[in-house]
């Protein structure tokens, strides 16, 4: 008869890897929610230009008919982790590191 550890392959699962991947999905979702707050094209253009995005890329994102999820992935290049943290959203990976230390 096999021992319990041989059946349970996920006993030593790398939680940091799982947390990082789910944190990336949460970051995209947070960026999507931030993007949904900017309803008018004028507002999107003004804010994206203030975030130092090029004019042609700003026009492309503002007039895009893509879904929020696809635009959010492009927008993550401008909205860095520091800017998202200033808005009050915390990274799951950093929270995991804080909890793991204690």
Image (tube, helix red, strand yellow):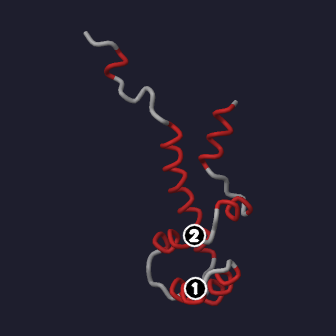
Crowd around label 2: few <14 · some 14–19 · many ≥20 (10 Å): few
Residue 49 in picture, x, y percent from top left? 66, 84
Judging depth in this view, the residue of 40 and 52 nearest the camera is: 52
Where disc 2 sits, the SS reads loop
Residue drawn where x is 57% and y is 59% of the image: 27
- Which residue was labeled with disc 2? 77
Q: Residue most toward the left?
A: 1
Q: Residue most toward the right?
A: 86
Which circle's residue, 1 or 2, is located before the other in the chain? Answer: 1
Q: Taking 87 as reference, is 76 left or right?
A: left
Residue drawn where x is 63% and y is 79% of the image: 38
Identify the image quadrant of the C terminus: top right
Crowd around label 1: few <14 · some 14–19 · many ≥20 (10 Å): many
How many numbered marks does the figure carry?
2
Where disc 1 sits, the SS reads helix
Q: Taking 77 as reference, is 98 left or right?
A: right
Rendered position, 96 above or below 89? above
Residue drawn where x is 70% and y is 61% of the image: 82
Residue 88 in picture, x, y percent from top left? 72, 59
Rendered position, 99 above or below 42? above
Q: Quadrant of residue 31?
A: bottom right
Residue drawn where x is 68% and y is 32% of the image: 101
Rendered position, 70 above or below 15? below
Residue 89 in picture, x, y percent from top left? 67, 57
- Which residue was labeled with disc 1? 58
Q: Quadrant of residue 7?
A: top left
């Amino acid at each position: 008869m096999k021992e319990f550890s041989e059946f349970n392959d996920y006993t030593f699962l790398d939680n940091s890897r799982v947390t990082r991947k789910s944190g990336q999905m949460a970051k995209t979702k947070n960026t999507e929610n931030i993007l949904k707050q900017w309803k008018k094209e004028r507002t999107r253009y003004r804010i994206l230009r203030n975030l130092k995005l090029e004019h042609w890329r700003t026009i492309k994102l503002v007039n895009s008919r893509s879904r929020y999820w696809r635009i959010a992935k492009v927008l993550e290049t401008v909205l860095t982790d520091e800017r998202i943290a200033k808005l009050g959203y915390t990274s799951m990976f950093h929270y995991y590191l804080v909890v793991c230390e204690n």
